[in-house]
Amino acid sequence: MTTWKRKSRWLAATLAVMALMLLFAAVPAYAAGQEADTGETEASVSFTAGQLRLESAPTLDFGAHAISHEAQEYPAVTTGDDVVVSDLRGNAEGWTLFASLSPFQLEEEGGDTLKAASIRFTLPRVNAENGTIGTAPGAEETITLPSDATETRIFTAQGGQGMGVWSLGWDAANIVLAVKPGTAQDGRSTAALTWSLQSAP
Protein backbone atom coordinates (compact mmCIF):
# COMPACT_ATOMS: atom_id res chain seq x y z
CA MET A 1 0.00 0.00 0.00
CA THR A 2 1.37 3.39 -0.91
CA THR A 3 2.20 5.99 1.70
CA TRP A 4 -0.42 8.30 0.21
CA LYS A 5 -3.24 5.73 0.69
CA ARG A 6 -2.17 5.04 4.27
CA LYS A 7 -2.23 8.76 5.07
CA SER A 8 -5.67 9.15 3.46
CA ARG A 9 -7.16 6.35 5.61
CA TRP A 10 -5.54 7.72 8.75
CA LEU A 11 -6.97 11.17 8.00
CA ALA A 12 -10.48 9.75 7.41
CA ALA A 13 -10.39 7.80 10.67
CA THR A 14 -9.16 10.84 12.56
CA LEU A 15 -11.96 13.01 11.12
CA ALA A 16 -14.59 10.37 12.09
CA VAL A 17 -13.32 10.27 15.68
CA MET A 18 -13.37 14.06 15.90
CA ALA A 19 -16.96 14.16 14.57
CA LEU A 20 -18.09 11.70 17.24
CA MET A 21 -16.36 13.75 19.96
CA LEU A 22 -18.12 16.91 18.79
CA LEU A 23 -21.49 15.10 18.74
CA PHE A 24 -21.17 13.86 22.33
CA ALA A 25 -19.89 17.25 23.49
CA ALA A 26 -23.15 18.88 22.25
CA VAL A 27 -25.35 16.65 24.52
CA PRO A 28 -25.62 17.85 28.20
CA ALA A 29 -24.17 15.30 30.54
CA TYR A 30 -26.38 14.71 33.63
CA ALA A 31 -25.24 12.68 36.55
CA ALA A 32 -27.41 9.69 37.40
CA GLY A 33 -30.64 10.91 39.12
CA GLN A 34 -29.88 14.62 38.57
CA GLU A 35 -32.93 16.83 37.80
CA ALA A 36 -33.29 20.06 35.89
CA ASP A 37 -33.41 23.33 37.86
CA THR A 38 -36.83 24.35 39.34
CA GLY A 39 -38.18 27.52 40.87
CA GLU A 40 -41.38 29.06 42.19
CA THR A 41 -43.24 32.37 42.03
CA GLU A 42 -46.25 33.76 43.91
CA ALA A 43 -49.94 34.25 43.04
CA SER A 44 -51.94 36.58 45.32
CA VAL A 45 -55.40 38.11 45.56
CA SER A 46 -57.17 40.45 48.00
CA PHE A 47 -60.87 40.83 48.80
CA THR A 48 -63.04 43.49 50.45
CA ALA A 49 -65.80 42.32 52.79
CA GLY A 50 -69.37 42.52 51.48
CA GLN A 51 -72.71 42.44 53.31
CA LEU A 52 -75.04 40.01 55.00
CA ARG A 53 -78.36 40.35 53.15
CA LEU A 54 -81.81 38.81 52.93
CA GLU A 55 -82.23 38.65 49.15
CA SER A 56 -85.79 37.29 48.98
CA ALA A 57 -88.60 35.73 51.02
CA PRO A 58 -91.90 34.03 50.18
CA THR A 59 -95.26 35.70 49.64
CA LEU A 60 -98.00 33.19 50.47
CA ASP A 61 -101.47 32.74 49.00
CA PHE A 62 -103.80 30.21 50.65
CA GLY A 63 -106.62 30.54 48.11
CA ALA A 64 -110.37 31.12 48.59
CA HIS A 65 -112.59 28.92 50.77
CA ALA A 66 -116.09 28.69 52.18
CA ILE A 67 -116.35 29.51 55.89
CA SER A 68 -116.39 26.26 57.84
CA HIS A 69 -117.91 25.27 61.18
CA GLU A 70 -114.83 23.13 61.88
CA ALA A 71 -111.12 23.84 62.36
CA GLN A 72 -109.47 23.83 58.96
CA GLU A 73 -105.97 23.66 57.51
CA TYR A 74 -105.40 25.19 54.08
CA PRO A 75 -102.21 24.38 52.13
CA ALA A 76 -100.66 27.26 50.23
CA VAL A 77 -101.72 27.69 46.62
CA THR A 78 -98.59 29.66 45.71
CA THR A 79 -95.43 30.37 47.69
CA GLY A 80 -93.55 32.95 45.63
CA ASP A 81 -89.78 33.15 46.10
CA ASP A 82 -87.74 31.00 48.47
CA VAL A 83 -85.90 32.57 51.37
CA VAL A 84 -82.43 33.50 50.05
CA VAL A 85 -79.63 34.72 52.33
CA SER A 86 -76.26 35.92 51.05
CA ASP A 87 -73.33 36.21 53.46
CA LEU A 88 -70.46 37.97 51.71
CA ARG A 89 -68.77 39.31 54.85
CA GLY A 90 -66.00 36.74 54.63
CA ASN A 91 -65.65 36.32 58.41
CA ALA A 92 -67.54 33.03 58.96
CA GLU A 93 -69.25 34.44 62.06
CA GLY A 94 -72.66 32.95 61.26
CA TRP A 95 -76.15 34.45 61.22
CA THR A 96 -79.79 33.78 62.18
CA LEU A 97 -83.04 34.44 60.33
CA PHE A 98 -86.25 34.93 62.34
CA ALA A 99 -89.81 35.24 61.05
CA SER A 100 -93.04 36.50 62.58
CA LEU A 101 -96.67 36.71 61.50
CA SER A 102 -98.88 39.68 62.32
CA PRO A 103 -102.61 39.39 63.14
CA PHE A 104 -104.82 38.98 60.07
CA GLN A 105 -106.84 42.01 58.99
CA LEU A 106 -109.95 42.25 56.84
CA GLU A 107 -108.81 44.01 53.69
CA GLU A 108 -112.00 45.95 52.97
CA GLU A 109 -113.34 46.93 56.39
CA GLY A 110 -110.20 46.62 58.50
CA GLY A 111 -110.07 45.14 61.97
CA ASP A 112 -108.62 41.91 63.28
CA THR A 113 -109.90 38.56 62.03
CA LEU A 114 -108.88 34.89 62.07
CA LYS A 115 -108.07 35.04 65.78
CA ALA A 116 -105.47 32.41 66.83
CA ALA A 117 -104.61 31.53 63.23
CA SER A 118 -101.12 30.23 62.48
CA ILE A 119 -98.92 29.18 59.57
CA ARG A 120 -96.96 25.92 59.79
CA PHE A 121 -93.91 25.12 57.64
CA THR A 122 -92.57 21.54 57.39
CA LEU A 123 -89.93 19.61 55.43
CA PRO A 124 -87.65 22.48 54.40
CA ARG A 125 -85.25 22.40 51.44
CA VAL A 126 -81.81 23.99 51.88
CA ASN A 127 -79.79 24.59 48.71
CA ALA A 128 -76.48 26.22 47.83
CA GLU A 129 -76.95 28.89 45.16
CA ASN A 130 -74.64 30.42 42.51
CA GLY A 131 -72.06 27.65 42.86
CA THR A 132 -71.64 28.19 46.61
CA ILE A 133 -69.60 25.53 48.39
CA GLY A 134 -69.01 25.07 52.09
CA THR A 135 -71.04 24.12 55.15
CA ALA A 136 -74.78 24.67 54.88
CA PRO A 137 -76.83 26.56 57.48
CA GLY A 138 -79.44 24.60 59.42
CA ALA A 139 -83.21 24.87 59.02
CA GLU A 140 -85.89 23.99 61.57
CA GLU A 141 -87.83 20.88 60.49
CA THR A 142 -91.15 22.28 61.71
CA ILE A 143 -91.91 25.98 62.18
CA THR A 144 -95.18 27.39 63.48
CA LEU A 145 -95.78 31.12 63.23
CA PRO A 146 -98.71 32.24 65.42
CA SER A 147 -100.54 35.34 64.26
CA ASP A 148 -99.44 37.39 67.24
CA ALA A 149 -96.10 38.69 65.86
CA THR A 150 -94.01 36.24 67.93
CA GLU A 151 -90.51 35.92 66.42
CA THR A 152 -89.49 32.35 65.56
CA ARG A 153 -86.07 31.11 64.49
CA ILE A 154 -86.18 29.44 61.06
CA PHE A 155 -82.69 29.44 59.49
CA THR A 156 -79.37 29.43 61.38
CA ALA A 157 -75.70 29.45 60.37
CA GLN A 158 -73.36 28.63 63.22
CA GLY A 159 -69.76 29.89 63.12
CA GLY A 160 -68.12 28.57 59.97
CA GLN A 161 -71.47 27.91 58.24
CA GLY A 162 -73.60 29.76 55.70
CA MET A 163 -70.95 31.71 53.78
CA GLY A 164 -71.95 32.46 50.21
CA VAL A 165 -75.57 32.26 49.01
CA TRP A 166 -78.12 29.81 50.49
CA SER A 167 -81.81 29.26 49.89
CA LEU A 168 -84.54 27.84 52.12
CA GLY A 169 -87.79 26.71 50.55
CA TRP A 170 -90.85 24.54 51.07
CA ASP A 171 -93.27 22.80 48.74
CA ALA A 172 -96.64 24.54 48.75
CA ALA A 173 -98.29 21.47 50.31
CA ASN A 174 -95.95 21.81 53.29
CA ILE A 175 -97.02 25.37 54.14
CA VAL A 176 -100.39 25.26 55.90
CA LEU A 177 -102.66 27.98 57.31
CA ALA A 178 -104.58 26.76 60.38
CA VAL A 179 -107.93 28.50 61.02
CA LYS A 180 -110.17 28.08 64.07
CA PRO A 181 -113.96 27.86 63.64
CA GLY A 182 -115.88 31.03 64.38
CA THR A 183 -113.00 33.35 63.41
CA ALA A 184 -113.30 33.75 59.63
CA GLN A 185 -115.20 36.72 58.24
CA ASP A 186 -116.50 37.31 54.75
CA GLY A 187 -113.88 38.95 52.54
CA ARG A 188 -110.15 38.85 51.91
CA SER A 189 -107.85 38.79 54.92
CA THR A 190 -104.13 39.59 54.94
CA ALA A 191 -101.28 39.44 57.43
CA ALA A 192 -97.67 40.57 57.28
CA LEU A 193 -94.76 38.16 57.40
CA THR A 194 -91.72 39.89 58.88
CA TRP A 195 -88.26 38.42 58.23
CA SER A 196 -85.42 39.52 60.51
CA LEU A 197 -81.80 38.61 59.66
CA GLN A 198 -79.31 38.98 62.51
CA SER A 199 -75.52 38.86 62.15
CA ALA A 200 -74.90 36.23 64.84
CA PRO A 201 -75.95 32.59 65.34
Image (cartoon, grey):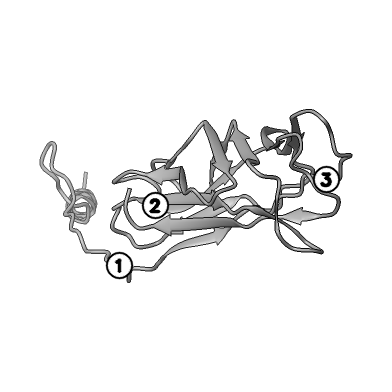
> Is 138 on the left-hand or right-hand side of 43?
right
Observer-nearest of 4 and 191: 191
Residue tagged 2:
163
Residue occupying the far top of the picture:
70
Cα distance between the residues tagged 3 and 2: 36 Å
Measured as percent of width and height from the top left, residue 76 is found at 75, 41
Q: Residue 63 carries which label?
A: 3
Quarter where residue 35 is shown = top left
Residue tagged 1:
45
- Element carrying mark 3: loop
* The N terminus - image quarter: top left
Observer-nearest of 76 and 111: 111
Camera-side mark, 3 or 2: 3
> Is 107 on the left-hand or right-hand side of 154?
right
Label located before the other in sequence (3 or 2): 3
Measured as percent of width and height from the top left, residue 144 is found at 56, 37
